[in-house]
Amino acid sequence: MLYSGDNASPEVGETYSLFVIDKAQEIESSITDPADGHLVAYYHGIVPYPATIQIPWDFTDSDGVTPYSNDTYVVTFTAFDPTTITITNKIERHGVRKAAGNILTYEEEDPNLSAGSYLNSEADKWVNSLAFAYESLYDGD
């Protein structure tokens, strides 16, 4: 699992749960109501390459129109290699959550390659700028 969409607000319109697969395979995902287990959304398909899979959900019930009324929902993701992940997420009904943390990472290039050192230097510069911008925007409240 890459990102679970936990504490998202219906005000954002749509939330995504992201899962990473490392090879071509069949995937299946569902969103259910933990109160009674009814199916809210279902996704199925074959992904022909390694990828980050985005499971979208628009905070509606199974008819795609009625607003979902529970404050939690369960996302189940299955990659048929086989792996199944099940997560219960909370809906934030009183606004969009404040950021509490951020993981910023990148892969370095081999410095022995022709542009490797330059690319690493540029990545360091921009990643450090983004980290500074994020920290200065977050006021700690």
Image: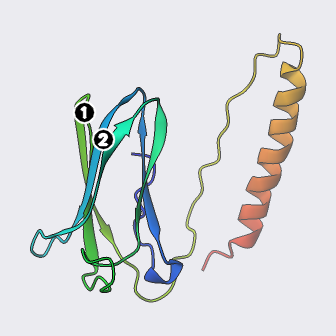
**Residue 10 at what x, y percent from top left?**
44, 81
Q: Residue at x 13, y 70 (%)?
A: 38
Q: Residue at x 78, y 58 (%)?
A: 132
Q: Is residue 116 left or right of residue 101?
A: right
State which tag comes first along the sequence, 1 or 2: 2
Q: Position of residue 88 (x, y in %)?
A: 26, 63
Quarter containing the C terminus: bottom right
In the depicted structure, whether residue 16 falls above or below residue 138: above
Q: Residue furthest bottom?
A: 94
CB contact under 8 Å: marks 1 and 2:
yes
Q: Which residue is mark 2?
A: 27
Q: Residue at x 42, y 63 (%)?
A: 5
Residue 62's image quarter?
bottom left
Left or right for 121, reference 27: right
Tell me if I can see residue 76 in this picture: no
The amino acid type of the residue labelled 2 equals Ile
Q: Residues within 10 Å of mark 2 (few under 14, many from 20)?
A: many
Q: Is residue 116 left or right of residue 78?
A: right
Three-letter code, disc 1: Phe
> In which quadrant is the N terminus drawn?
top left
Q: Residue 30, image x and y in percent?
A: 25, 57
Q: CA distance from mark 1 to mark 2?
A: 6 Å
How far across and down, in percent of the image, does residue 98 sit? 56, 75
| Pointer 1 residue | 80
